[in-house]
Image: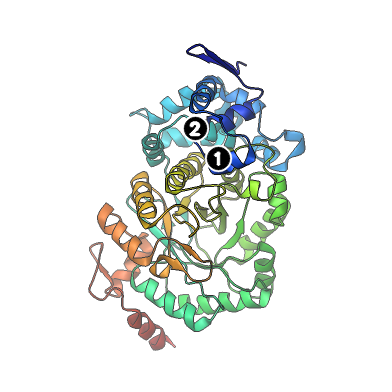
Amino acid sequence: MNLSTTLGSEKFSFASVKEVLAKANEKKSGDVLAGIAARTEIERVAAKQVLSELTLDELRQNPVIDYEKDEITRLIDDSLDGVAFGKIKNWSVAELREFLLDADTGADDVSEIRFALTGEMAAAVCKIMSNLDLMTAAKKCTVIAKARTTLGLPGVLAARLQPNHPSDSLAGITASLYEGLSYGIGDAVIGINPVYDTPESVGRLLHATDKIIRQLSLPTQNCILSHVTTQMKAIENGAPAGLIFQSIAGSEAGNAAFGIDISLIKEASDLGSKNCNVDGGSFMYFETGQGSELSSRSHNDADQVTLEARCYAFARTFRPFLVNDVVGFIGPEYLADGRQMIRAGLEDHFMGKLLGVPMGIDACYTNHMDADQNDLENLTVLLVASGVNYFMGVPMGDDVMLSYQSSSYHDVASLRELMGCRPAPEFEAWLEERGLISNGKLTERAGNAKLIADMCAAAR
């Protein structure tokens, strides 16, 4: 295994595959903070050169966290498709890139190899791709997921309806929910981040959202994004849930910081298989974000892109309906500005789709980042062109509970119109029946929350 190269008259040598992966990464403030980033641009190029020549087998044999020390490494490696891996093990990272970008490579070709790839492999090829490369390859990596709605179909752009409220007020949540539905938002999920992480509060919100879903005969699913153990208790107490949520990390220690491990997620999945109100068999919802492991000092000196890819390889084991990268939420310590945020969003969408998970992106930023609304909107357009499954739908794009900026109801509606996309087919049929959409376009009735309120009142 060669970990050295010469550029011009300067020789570069790296101590490990992990160091090569870190230094080949595009500049990220999180890697700089961790002390593992390339010191110069020429060192970054040298690392990319070395990385491009490594084989997929060498990456498998050198995970960023040892097999014996980390249950995520073990889960990913033990679940690989051995037959498919045998066909590609001697490919270099550069050859994997060429395969993904080849004009003759289609979605079926990608699906044949994706379960032979580890997070390290997905991250490696990502690091030697330009933004346009990431978009071109991601477009081929179709991942369709089915619950009460079907996401990931060509030309479908879905949205999570996120009616958060700073005091979990049912009146405030309901008002935002009605408005979102009137704009055609909610086909991915009606998902609320609760203020109070108790089974009683979560159960109250699950009952309230389920009641609206039933009153409106709405083809979607509900989810309250509390800790997984809180949701499990609420469900065991009889609360009606559509999806079960949890934030995850790419290392065992990172997941421990979230208060979870693989066995707990398996327990939640078993509970969901018996109790979640979905038709398509997928009911898990995972959220991720570059830098979460570093924030809990569980990164093991690995870079944030590679750890993020490991999240997706972990998540796919549970056949999730939604996986969502909250790309700019953690803050400037990990993604300093709009440029890094855009790059991270494209990286994460590509890696998730390549590894086989149904990726959505929360195109977002916090107010202390050097980013603005134009950066957010630029990222959303690039992601729709890349085939992203879904975005967030937040009232006015300003989450009053989480205090960050995200995509609004209006943004999603505009993106669908601009890019020729439509809601999930089941949800679009519901909107058409109620005169809110016609031939894929919102009607003059759209945006009127009172219409939805009146529909609910008539159904009581």
Q: Quadrant of residue 23?
A: top right
Q: Position of residue 174 (x, y in %)?
A: 46, 79
Query: Which residue in the protein does label 1 denote?
Result: 305
Residue drawn at the location 70% of the way across and 45% of the way down: 298
Q: Looking at numbered disc 2 in the image, what kind of residue is underneath it? A: Lys
Q: Position of residue 377 (x, y in %)?
A: 35, 54
Front residue of 430/360: it is 360
Q: Looking at numbered disc 1 in the image, what kind of residue is underneath it? A: Val
Question: In the picture, which quadrant includes the N terminus?
Answer: top right
Mark 2–mark 1 Cα distance, whole angstroms, equals 9 Å
Q: Is residue 261 visible?
A: no
* In the image, farthest residue toward the right: 68
Residue drawn at the location 52% of the way across and 19% of the way down: 53
273 horizontally vs 188: left or right: right
Q: Is residue 286 above or below residue 7?
A: below
Label 1 Cα crowd, 10 Å radius (few <14 / some 14-19 / many 20+): many
- Number of residue marks: 2
Question: In the picture, which quadrant includes the C terminus?
Answer: bottom left
Q: Position of residue 281 (x, y in %)?
A: 54, 57
Q: Is residue 332 above or below residue 457?
A: above
Front residue of 60/110: it is 60
Query: Which residue in the protein does label 2 denote?
Result: 127
Q: Is residue 451 above or below residue 118?
A: below
Between discs 2 and 1, the one toward the N terminus: 2
- The secondary structure type at the circle numbered 2 is helix
Label 2 Cα crowd, 10 Å radius (few <14 / some 14-19 / many 20+): many
Q: Confirm or deny contact between disc 2 and disc 1 (CB under 8 A).
A: yes
